[in-house]
Amino acid sequence: MRFPLPVTNPPPNASWEWNGKFTDEQARFLDEHGFIRFSNFASMDEVQMIRDELAAVEAQWVREDREFVNGIPIKYGINDLGEKFVQRFAFASLFSEKMTAFFGDPRWEIVKTMCGEGFRIGLDEKDGVVVNHYLNVPGSKYKRLGWHIDALRDVFYGKMPEPMWNVGMYLDDSHIDKGALRLIPGTHKQSFPALLFGKRHFMDNRDDPREYIVEADAGDLTLHDGRLWHRVGKSLNTGPASRRRTMYIPFLNGDVLKKNEGSKTPFYHRFSRLIG
Ligand SMILES: O=C(O)CCC(=O)C(=O)O
Ligand SMILES: [Fe+2]
């Protein structure tokens, strides 16, 4: 039996071109479905700058054998060339002046207003700027990601999640052949038991007839509500053709909880490490 979830039906390929404005129609879409996509938010030069900066951070972390940033584990794998590479960065922008400057751009002020009253960009909160690098090769630790809600961290503490948005910027084209982001629209309005038991967090990778596939290109921006069920499918390609890099930035309101090198590893990370 499928767990009853409040599911909406967005039109296929619902997407807007980024033009620096957030319209009432877009606000209604976001509220109803819990996600939205804008194409061409960043230029290809900016995307390339971020890829280059990440490559430098990765080289540094591999050299240092770094395991954690501010208590958050870094995920490594072995790529198609037999080299160790970072598959999940945390707090990435804190290691790059150019990325820090990028997040100071006025565009992010507009993104804040899309999130609602009083939201801020959490470069040094939660897991900071997370970059996922999926690759379908034998040594990869990250070929897909099971169903979950990002607000699980709060749910572990037994409370209704604090409002948060996960804002995604794509660093590679990500169409269905790459696995792509799949979400269950409308589930940001689910009950507390549904947040906990709607699916088996991270362990369930199965297709769901209710899922909506978000396809996007490098430079596109997406927003999804921290309470929305989502996953990433496995690429149909192998090797470099399966590469999918996404960058996620938390937008938060409520209490400020900045992390530092003394921060403890949260329970949900030990959990996702065990099964990941
Ligand atoms: O890579 C994606 O598009 C989604 C990643 C994700 O859901 C996560 O890191 O929590
Ligand atoms: Fe997620």
Image (cartoon, rainbow, N blue to C red):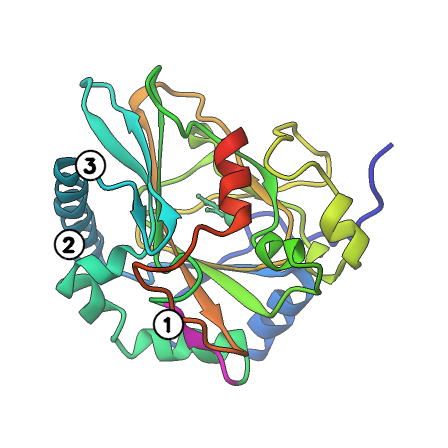
Above or below 153: residue 258: below
Rendered location of residue 217, percent (x, y): 36, 46
Report the residue marked by disc 2.
49
Which disc, if any, is residue 65?
3
Give the prevailing secondary structure in the magenta stretch: loop
For the record, the magenta segment spans: 118-122
Give the secondary structure at mark 1: loop
Report the residue marked by disc 1.
19
Tell me: is circle 2 under 8 Å from ligand 1.
no
197 with respect to 42 (left or right): right
- Report crowding for label 3: few under 14, some 14 to 19, many 20 or more residues within 10 A (C-alpha): few
Q: Earlier in the sequence, mark 2 or mark 3?
A: 2
Above or below 177: residue 133: below
33 with respect to 66 (left or right): right
- Closer to the eye: label 2 or 1: 2
- Closer to the eye: label 2 or 3: 3
Give the secondary structure at mark 2: helix
Please tell me in which quadrant of the rendered image residue 177 appears: top left
Residue at the spot 70% in from the left edge and 65% down from the top edge: 160
Tell me: is circle 1 under 8 Å from ligand 1.
no
- For the residues labelled 3 and 1, the Cα–Cα distance comes to 42 Å
- For the residues labelled 2 and 1, the Cα–Cα distance comes to 22 Å
Membership of 77 in magenta stretch: no
Q: Quadrant of the N terminus?
A: top right
Rendered location of residue 38, percent (x, y): 43, 61
Q: Earlier in the sequence, mark 2 or mark 1?
A: 1
